[in-house]
Image (cartoon, helix red, strand yellow):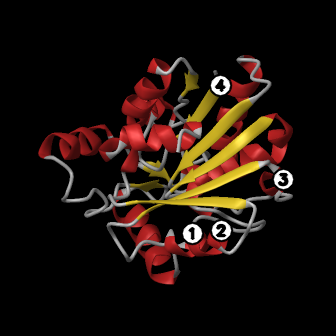
């Protein structure tokens, strides 16, 4: 049996992993699903000082205090930024790293660098207009209409504003995540206009990566939890 650390996306929280975590635990695995500072049940800690490095330290803290010597590290969406930073510090302890429709940054890049100037400006504008200059609400249309009404309500009612610094801080990394033996990229293919295709194309060109496509929306851990769990655990 293995140990899994699942890192959620922007506006999310530990709650977003409930279905995948259940599937992994039913298979006998240990699963940790930390919520970042200012997000989910830790939303009361949100402030303008929270940035990407804060969230990286959140996950590193779980790894340290739970004494995780060998584990699989998984990131969804913005969580790709987080796991890249985490892996840079503890890559020797990671047997497999999995990017689930996630950002795959290089050294010196922020999430905003990877979304293009129009989306970056929209993020800055909404933070100034609705978030006191530092909070970013979940964008309209970011939850697929193909989700059930119940699942849409679940995601939308539990989503909280994301601290802007998590999108603007540039990652300082030695690219140690590329030294991990097993590297997996999973692309959700429902929406052809996402920024995640660029990362899938990059990893598809590398022999040391394994790629999967899932015919669903960005919240693949909600709509296809068993398939997601099977990919994470190496069943398929």
Where's residue 126, x and y in %?
Answer: 37, 66
In depth, the one of 36 and 216 nearer the eye is 216
Q: Quadrant of the N terminus?
A: top right
Q: CA distance from mark 2 to mark 1?
A: 5 Å
Query: Which residue is located at x 15 percent, y 40 percent?
Result: 150
Task: Name which of mark 3 and mark 1 comes first in the sequence.
Answer: 3
In the rendered structure, the answer to whether residue 12 lies left or right of residue 35 reads left
Q: Are marks 2 and 1 in contact (CB under 8 Å)?
A: yes
From where the camera sits, is residue 15 visible?
Answer: no
Which residue bears the numbered disc 3? 179
What number is the disc on residue 2?
4
Task: Name which of mark 4 and mark 1 comes first in the sequence.
Answer: 4
Say above or below: 231 vs 34: below
Which residue bears the numbered disc 2? 203
Task: Name which of mark 3 and mark 2 comes first in the sequence.
Answer: 3
Say above or below: 62 vs 202: above
Q: CA distance from mark 3 to mark 1?
A: 18 Å
Could you classify mark 1 by the number of other residues whose Cα lies within 10 Å: few (under 14), some (14-19), or many (20 or more)? Answer: many
In depth, the one of 201 and 77 nearer the eye is 201
Where's residue 198, x and y in %?
Answer: 56, 75
Where's residue 21, x and y in %?
Answer: 46, 28
The quarter of the picture where residue 36 lies is: top right
Q: CA distance from mark 4 to mark 1?
A: 26 Å
Query: Which residue is located at x 42 percent, y 62 percent?
Result: 127
In depth, the one of 34 and 199 nearer the eye is 199
Task: Name which of mark 2 and mark 4 comes first in the sequence.
Answer: 4
**Identity of the residue furthest to the bottom in this view:** 117
Could you classify mark 4 by the number of other residues whose Cα lies within 10 Å: few (under 14), some (14-19), or many (20 or more)? Answer: some
Marks 4, 3: nearer the viewer: 4
Which residue bears the numbered disc 1? 200
């Amino acid at each position: 049996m293995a140990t899994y650390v699942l890192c959620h996306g922007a506006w999310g929280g530990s709650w977003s992993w409930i279905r995948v975590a259940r599937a992994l635990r039913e298979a006998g695995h240990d699963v940790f699903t930390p919520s970042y500072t200012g997000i989910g049940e830790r939303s009361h800690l949100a402030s303008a000082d929270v940035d990407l490095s804060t969230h990286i330290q959140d996950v590193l803290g779980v790894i340290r205090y739970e004494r995780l010597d060998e584990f699989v590290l998984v990131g969804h969406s913005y969580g790709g930024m987080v796991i890249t930073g985490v892996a840079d510090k503890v890559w020797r302890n990671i047997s497999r790293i999995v990017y689930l429709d996630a950002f795959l940054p290089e050294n010196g890049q922020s999430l905003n660098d990877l979304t293009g100037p129009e989306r970056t400006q929209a993020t800055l504008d909404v933070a100034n207009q609705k978030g006191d200059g530092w909070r970013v609400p979940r964008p309209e249309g970011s939850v697929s209409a193909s989700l059930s009404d119940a699942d849409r309500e679940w995601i939308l009612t539990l989503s909280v504003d994301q601290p802007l610094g998590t999108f603007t801080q540039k990652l300082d990394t030695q690219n140690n995540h590329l030294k991990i033996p097993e590297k997996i990229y999973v692309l959700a293919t429902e929406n052809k206009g996402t920024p995640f295709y660029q990362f899938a194309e990059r990893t598809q060109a590398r022999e040391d990566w394994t790629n999967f496509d899932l015919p669903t929306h960005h919240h693949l851990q909600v709509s296809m939890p068993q398939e997601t769990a099977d990919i994470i655990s190496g069943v398929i």
